[in-house]
Structure formats: C-alpha cells, structure tokens
Image: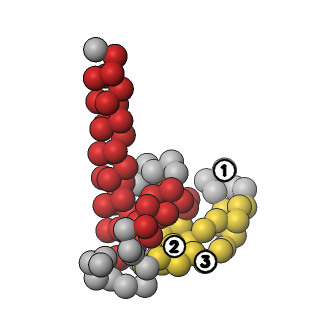
Amino acid sequence: MRRRARTSKATARGKIKAAQRVHVLKTLRRHTGSTIELRHHLDILAPAARIYELRKEGHDIVTLWDRQQTRQGRFHRVALYMLLSKGVAR
C-alpha cells in the first residue's frame, strides 16, 4: 500500500512539472521571461529547474543576467530566459 502512495505522489509531481514546462514555454514563445516573473506570475518556485528540463528536451534557451527590483524593493541579480527557436523541439 505504501509503495502505491509513493508512486502516486511521484506521478503527481511529474505531471505538475510537465504542466509548468508548458507554461514556461508558452511564456518564452511570447517574450523573454525573468526568474521573478516566472515565480510570481506563473507560480513556479524553481524556474531554473524547468528551464534545465526544457533544454534537455532540445529547446534552445539562453540565459542573460540582469538586476531587477522585487516587490519588496530589493535589487537582485536575476536570470532572463530567451527562447531562440520558436518552433517545436527536435
């Protein structure tokens, strides 16, 4: 019984990650997305991990660095992600 519960949790996590990758990809097809934007607007707490997974799938995503202000007024070095090829990954 316990094994089944763990498998269900793992499956659920995999589905959540897949859905987050879809949202990130849709955003990057429209414009450059920052770490702050992906966290706050798409509710993705680990955008770098989703970018890594998308790159492994074959998407050509580059990272640029910028300083941006958070809602609290602090400046942070944040990643800006840009999708170079707008088509489907190979």
Q: Residues within 10 Å of mark 2 (few under 14, many from 20)?
A: many
Secondary element under disc 2, as helix, strand or loop, is strand
Q: Quadrant of the C terminus?
A: bottom left
User: Residue 45: image x %, image y %?
Assistant: 51, 48
Tell me the tag on residue 64: 3
Q: Residue at x 33, y 83 (%)?
A: 86
Q: Residues within 10 Å of mark 3 (few under 14, many from 20)?
A: few
Tell me the tag on residue 81: 2
Q: Residue at x 49, y 63 (%)?
A: 52
Q: Quadrant of the N terminus?
A: top left
On the image, numbered disc 1 is attached to which residue? 72
Task: Say which of 78 and 47 sits in front.
Answer: 47
Secondary element under disc 1, as helix, strand or loop, is loop
User: Residue 18: image x %, image y %?
Assistant: 32, 53
Q: Residue at x 28, y 23 (%)?
A: 4
Amino acid type for the residue under numbered disc 3: Leu
Tell me the tag on residue 20: none
Query: Which of pointers 1 and 2 lies earlier in the amino acid sequence?
Result: 1
Q: Residues within 10 Å of mark 1 (few under 14, many from 20)?
A: few
Secondary element under disc 3, as helix, strand or loop, is strand
Query: Which of pointers 3 and 2 lies earlier in the amino acid sequence?
Result: 3
Amino acid type for the residue under numbered disc 1: Gln
User: Residue 68: image x %, image y %?
Assistant: 65, 66
Q: Is residue 56 left or right of residue 12?
A: right
Task: Say which of 39 and 6 sits in front.
Answer: 6
Mark in the foreground, 1 or 2: 2
Q: Residue at x 43, y 84 (%)?
A: 84
Q: In this picture, is 26 found above or below 62? A: above
Amino acid type for the residue under numbered disc 2: Tyr
Q: CA distance from mark 3 to mark 2?
A: 6 Å
Query: Which of pointers 1 and 3 lies earlier in the amino acid sequence?
Result: 3
Q: Marks 2 and 3: in contact by CB < 8 Å?
A: yes
